Image (cartoon, rainbow, N blue to C red):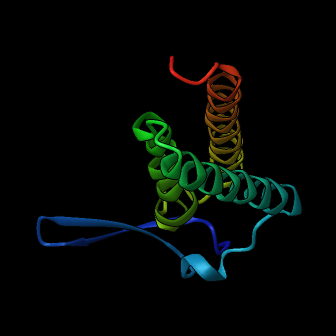
Amino acid sequence: MEPQDTVSLIDNRWVTVRQVARPEDVPEAPAVTALRTEAQREADLLDKVIRAARTQGIPVIYAERHLVTADLGLNVRPRLAWFDNYETKRQMFRFIAQSCRTARRELEDKHRYLSMRPLGR
């Protein structure tokens, strides 16, 4: 068996699904690690832009949802046996990077638009 393989444990009527190895001991392909790093970078950039926008009075609630999904995708789901595989992680990290990037750009565009408006409007 490989460390990333799943096993099902049956105890009376309870079934538990886990991997052969602990999540932190499951090897990650270099391509997935690169995607994880990019997703984390985009989430960090979005967090910085959200904090800056909040101080300027720009509504950020819709952008914050992307940080929630990024946190789930980067820190929670990879620890679950059914998400801890190459293809699922690849898709998940790509989604996180793209959604955080899009939300960040929307906030940056909103800031540019608001800063171009004359005072008093």
Question: What count of labels does the image hold?
Answer: 0
Q: Which of 24 and 95 is in front in this view?
A: 95
Left or right side of 16 for 22 = right
Along the line of sight, which residue is nearer the eye, 84 or 108?
Answer: 108
Image quadrant where one finds the N terminus: bottom right
Residue in the picture at 51% in, 52% down: 55
Left or right: 92, with 66 as reference point: right
Q: Which residue lies furthest to the front in this view?
A: 120
x 67%, y 40%: residue: 91
Identity of the residue drawn at 51% across and 21% down: 120
Image-quadrant location for residue 15:
bottom left
- Position in image of residue 8 (x %, y %): 37, 66
Instruction: Name the residue nearer the viewer: 17 or 114.
Output: 114
Q: Is residue 61 above or below residue 12?
A: above
What x and y, as percent, mark residue 40? 69, 59
Where residue 48 sits: x, y (%)?
A: 64, 57
For residue 26, what is the image quadrant? bottom right
In this rendering, would 108 be left or right of 121?
Answer: right
- Residue 114: horizontal and vertical position, in percent? 61, 25
Residue at image location 67% in from the left, 22% down from the top: 113
Work out whether residue 68 or residue 18 is closer to the camera in this orientation and state it. 68
> Which residue is farthest left?
13
Q: In this view, does 2 lie to the left or right of 13?
A: right
Q: Is residue 73 above or below residue 115?
A: below
